[in-house]
Amino acid sequence: MSRPIYLDHAATSYPKPPAVISAVADCMKYRGGNPGRGAHKLSLEAAKEIYACREVAARLFGAEPERVVFTLNTTHALNVAIKGLIGRNGGHILCSDMEHNAVYRPLYKMAQDGTATFDVFPTFSTTRQWSKSRILSSLAAKVRPDTRMVVCAHASNICSAVLPIEEIGQFCKRRGLFFVVDGAQSAGVYDLDVDRMGIDALCVPGHKGLLGPQGTGMLILGKGITLDTLIEGGNGMDSLLGEMSKDAPERFEAGTLQTPAIAGLRAGMEFVEAVGINTIREHERRLGIYLQDGLLSIPRVKVYAPYRKGGVVLFTVDGYNSDEIGALLDRKGICVRPGFHCAALGHRTLGTPDGGAVRASLGWGSKERDVEALLQVVGRL
Ligand code: PMP
């Protein structure tokens, strides 16, 4: 079977580098013990595998290995971070108007339960020219005396727009607010450094830009950050106590970890390090602009973005529902994602129509000919 043209990297990257697949298989073959749960060789080997992955992540995100917590995905990391930092004391939270449901829904649920309140700050208005200072003023205007946290995406999952997280981090430090960053679309594509950027909790997927297997994500904690647990259970430590051990990362890793997938994640991150984040970003940016230019040259096509940048391109074609275009492209062997991309807030901000829009998202392995194949099908509509 010939491999389809995969332009859905914002959902998950595919294919994974061969080194990732071998790392998963090798771990399952040779290091199949439960990490931290036995005094035997196979358990110790599995624990080493986990630690090796923590070390690579620590290097990539500017932290020590002990501040790298493994999660199942970004959503899991965000829930642990947001709910754990807010705890039982509650308070007011601010998020941007570009958020994915991985941020919006936990905040919505907390507001429904009466645990916290939240407001949304505008970022990329379609009617006004955006700027970093305008985004910062719109954030500042929403801060209340009881505000405790700002949570926002680094890069949007529908249009590649990037929020000024370094400046937002400085703002949060000055105001004494927790700062949680959703790095789902930026990890492996943009530089991220928790300490330098003033981030208290960085939530990233392993399965997108870091090129690891599905079922991997990480929460990278800021220095000295302590939080409540979301899930309790065994972690191979302090087994006689009812209370979870105090120390990260094990405090947040109850239950058996996905060791083979974590082994694959290490290989994925090493691949990203070897190629270089700047090279990957420039590749995606160049192809993204090629795609946007091509789409804009086709009559009746509209592209939604505050500016031209990055490898995530959102578009509609007059007279067609986004699902129809998604299905047509699928029949031609091209994978994209139509609809709302779990990002109701962002779609509202960019003003997409009722049927949503089509998202084509490029990755490190994408080629010019992949873009041209998509343009050819859309051009014939
Ligand atoms: N935030 C953003 C901005 C995303 O794009 C995604 C994935 N679409 C998520 C969160 C959720 O990521 P995951 O599937 O790893 O939980």
Image: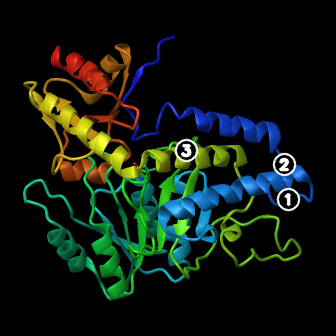
Q: Which residue is mark 3?
A: 268
Cα distance in 3D space between marks 3 and 1: 26 Å
- Answer yes or no: disc 1 within 8 Å of ligand 1: no
Name the secondary structure under disc 2.
Answer: loop
Q: Amino acid at mark 3?
A: Gly
User: 234 left or right of 292?
Assistant: right
Q: Residue 33 shows which numbered tag? A: 2
User: Depth-wise, is mark 3 or mark 1 nearer the camera?
Assistant: 3
Q: Which residue appears farthest toward the top when viewing the image?
A: 1
Q: Nearer the viewer, residue 14 or 350?
A: 14
Q: Amino acid at mark 2?
A: Gly
Name the secondary structure under disc 1.
Answer: loop
Look at the numbered discs 3 and 2 and tell me whether their residues touch, using CB distance below 8 Å. Answer: no
Residue 356 visible, this orientation:
no
Quadrant containing the C terminus is top left
Sequence order check: which comes first, mark 3 or mark 2?
A: 2
Percent x, y of residue 135? 20, 69
